[in-house]
Image: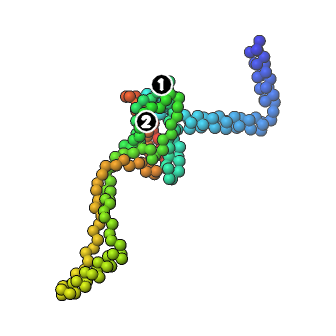
C-alpha cells in the first residue's frame, strides 16, 4: 500500500514537472547536475588515497600548515586494537616514534617532530680573551720591556679560530621539505600513504 502511494505521488510530481516550461526544466536539470558534481568532487577529495598497503587501518589527513611549521599530519587509528611501538617515516629518512597509539585515537605530527642523525660541527668553548683594559696594560708593559732590551717589536699574532668538533646529532626535518609519502609501521604491519607534492 505504501509503495503504491509513493509510486502515485512520484508520477504526479513528474507530470507536474513535464507541464512546466522548458526553461524551468533545464534549470532544474542543471542544478541537479551541479549538485552531483559537487558531491562527487567532495567524495574524491575527502577519501583517503592509500594506494599502498594499509595493514594498520590508518586514516591520514595531510594539512598544508604554514611556511614556519610546514605541513602536518593528523593520523587516526581506526582499527579495534592499539598500535604498539609505532614508527613514522617520511622522505629523507626522517623518523619519529610513539610507544602506543590507542584504538580510535588521533595524533598530530608536525615536520619538526621527524628527525634523523646527521654529522654537525660544534664550536668548542674556549677561555675567553682578556678584556681590552687588561690587554692594553699587557701590551704597554711588553713594549717597554722590548724597548729596554733593544728588541724589535713583532706584530701580535692573529687570533686563533675556535676549535670545532664533529658530532652526530638528531636534526629535525626542515619546514620546506617536499614530503611524498608517510610510512607507518607497528610490529610488522605497515601503512604507506602517498602524498601529492605541491606544484
Res. 60 visible in picture: no
Dot 1, crowdedness within 10 Å: few (<14), some or many (≥20)? few
Name the image quarter holding residue 121.
bottom left
Q: Position of residue 155 (x, y in %)?
A: 25, 80
Query: Disc number at residue 98?
Result: 2
Name the image quarter holding residue 149.
bottom left
Q: How is the image coloured?
A: rainbow
> For the residues carrying marks 1 and 2, which lies nearer the camera in this image?
2
Q: Secondary structure at mark 1?
A: loop
Query: Disc number at residue 141?
Result: none
Q: Position of residue 119 (x, y in %)?
A: 31, 51
Taking 23 as reference, is 70 left or right?
A: left
Query: Disc number at residue 81?
Result: 1
- Of callouts 1 and 2, the N-terminal one: 1
Q: Position of residue 142 (x, y in %)?
A: 25, 81
Question: Which residue is at 42% across, 48% downward?
Answer: 173
Amino acid at each position: 500500500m505504501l509503495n503504491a502511494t509513493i509510486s502515485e505521488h512520484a508520477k504526479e510530481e513528474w507530470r507536474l514537472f513535464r507541464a512546466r516550461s522548458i526553461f524551468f526544466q533545464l534549470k532544474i536539470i542543471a542544478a541537479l547536475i551541479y549538485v552531483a558534481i559537487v558531491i562527487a568532487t567532495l567524495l574524491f577529495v575527502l577519501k583517503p588515497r592509500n594506494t599502498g598497503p594499509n595493514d594498520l587501518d590508518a586514516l591520514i589527513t595531510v594539512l598544508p600548515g604554514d611556511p614556519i611549521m610546514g605541513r602536518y599530519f593528523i593520523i587516526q587509528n581506526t582499527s579495534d586494537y592499539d598500535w604498539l611501538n609505532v614508527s613514522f617515516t617520511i622522505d629523507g629518512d626522517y623518523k619519529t616514534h610513539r610507544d602506543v597509539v590507542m584504538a580510535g585515537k588521533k595524533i598530530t605530527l608536525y615536520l619538526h617532530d621527524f628527525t634523523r642523525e646527521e654529522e654537525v660541527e660544534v664550536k668548542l668553548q674556549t677561555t675567553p680573551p682578556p678584556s681590552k683594559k687588561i690587554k692594553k696594560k699587557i701590551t704597554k708593559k711588553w713594549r717597554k720591556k722590548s724597548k729596554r732590551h733593544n728588541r724589535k717589536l713583532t706584530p701580535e699574532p692573529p687570533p686563533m679560530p675556535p676549535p670545532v668538533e664533529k658530532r652526530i646529532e638528531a636534526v629535525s626535518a626542515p619546514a620546506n621539505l617536499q614530503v611524498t609519502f608517510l610510512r607507518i609501521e607497528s610490529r610488522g604491519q605497515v601503512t604507506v600513504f602517498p602524498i601529492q607534492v605541491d606544484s
